[in-house]
Image (cartoon, rainbow, N blue to C red):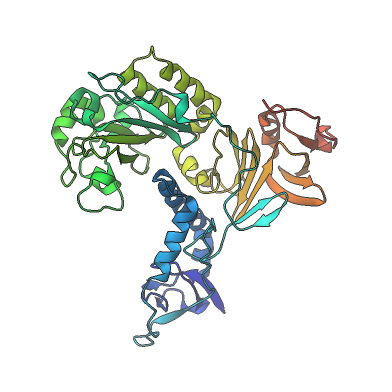
Amino acid sequence: MLMTIDCPACGEPLQVPEQAAGRRAKCNHCDGRFVVPSAEDLLESTVTHFALDEMDQRRREHRYEEAGGSGVAAVAEASAAARTRSAPREPDLSGGTVVGISAVGRNPAAGSPGDTATGVPLTVDRLGGSSSGATPEEDPPPATAGAASDYPQDLRAAAERPHLVVRRVSLDGVLLAFDARWLHHDRFRASMPVRSAFNGEADAAKLTARPMVFLDAVEEAAPRARPIELRYEHENVHQATTAAMLDSIGCLRGVRAPFDRPILYYAHSDDAVPALSCRVREVGDERDAQVCEVLVPHGRVAAEWLAAVNGRCGEDYAKLGAEVESIGQTAWDGLPQKVKMRLEPWCAFQRGERFLAYFNDPDFTSSEAGLAGVVVTDKRLIYHKYRRLRSVSLRSAATLHLRRDGAVTRLTVTAGERRAKAGKMPHAKVADFLKTLPPGHRLALDAPHLGLSSRPPAASSHP
């Protein structure tokens, strides 16, 4: 009997006999060799692999968007790279190696948000239909939410001292910018709050100090910043001053000036988090007119850094604190880092969208939280499980049915003539879920066991 697995080297779906478990196999697409897992091992790792594959795709799209491209461009480039690989050679049947035969053809269509490595697209489902493609925005984004024009943008507002400006505020974090010349300023390089930039942890004994690495300034092209950070990071943050750690690091080798003089930031020692997203933008034609941009995931840490550099009296500090609260980043920051990293691939927040809560799917353990479940925002109810992603607008008339099934409550949504699953959760969490639904939502609630009967939603404008 044949089973389908993915080549670890190129991601090609391959068919191999189940009885080949434990033997070496060879991919007929890239000639990569690997050990065939058993059917049991394959089933156990499937959910995790799905999440990690989708996470990689989401990060690729994010990097292209940050660079001025788009998520579609990221997928198109990945597909183009796959097409430019050398043609597969004839299968080598020697040496007692099992040859894995391609199971399905690739789907190179740009815009598929699914697993480009396996060729199986994630099914994105809206109440109006089902399609393969990036989740479309169901409501036009607010014109001013997180816009750079909301904040002062003059990088040289204080000619004699360092200055930060806010470029963008979202659930991904706060994008801050500064003039690259301030990297020569030692006090500025030590100005980052001694708190985790990812989860806000303030206990220095639990933190690791890392240098910010601007990949644009690395002399030899590097795909990731994290390996460079590892050469210089300090674990005993509570036993040294920031100035002492900067002196110990010195200049980053292989990075052009002034970006070789790093700013220190901090991460929880137990968190396997990636490097901060740092980039350089050229301004005009002058070589020395360069702007550094840093995406700080934790909004409160970003606000503290802004206060440490610009002071607390400016309008930008007060506005940033209020906006971090208004988009629900406080609730988002309350999630464990692993959960946020798992939600990131499938829960693509729209600009200005406010995160309210996440409810883990009861089929997944607490250690697997983030791989599936229901997310509630001020605009949508988002359900994800395995390869199914469903987005339900809270601003369109629909009926949400809640039916108890033992210890769990199942959610389904009816819109027009269509009825679709919208997740499930432990019955004990239903009250919290109902309290989380934002004021002005247009869902009619149908839950007889809770004394709620289906009724047309009252017309209301969302605040």
| Residue occupying image coordinates x 76% and y 28% | 460
| Residue occupying image coordinates x 21% and y 38% | 259
Residue 346: x and y in percent read 55, 48
- The total number of labels drawn is 0
The answer to which quarter of the image holds residue 241 is: top left
Residue 300: x and y in percent read 42, 25
Quick one: which residue is furthest to the front in this view? Answer: 285
The one of 34 and 179 positioned closer to us in this rendering: 179
The one of 22 and 77 positioned closer to us in this rendering: 77
The answer to which quarter of the image holds residue 256 is: top left
Work out whether residue 442 can be spotted: yes
Quarter holding the C terminus is top right
Quick one: which residue is furthest to the top in this view? Answer: 313
| Residue occupying image coordinates x 46% and y 27% | 149
Residue 143: x and y in percent read 56, 32
Work out whether residue 240 can be spotted: no
| Residue occupying image coordinates x 53% and y 67% | 107
Quick one: which residue is furthest to the bottom in this view? Answer: 94
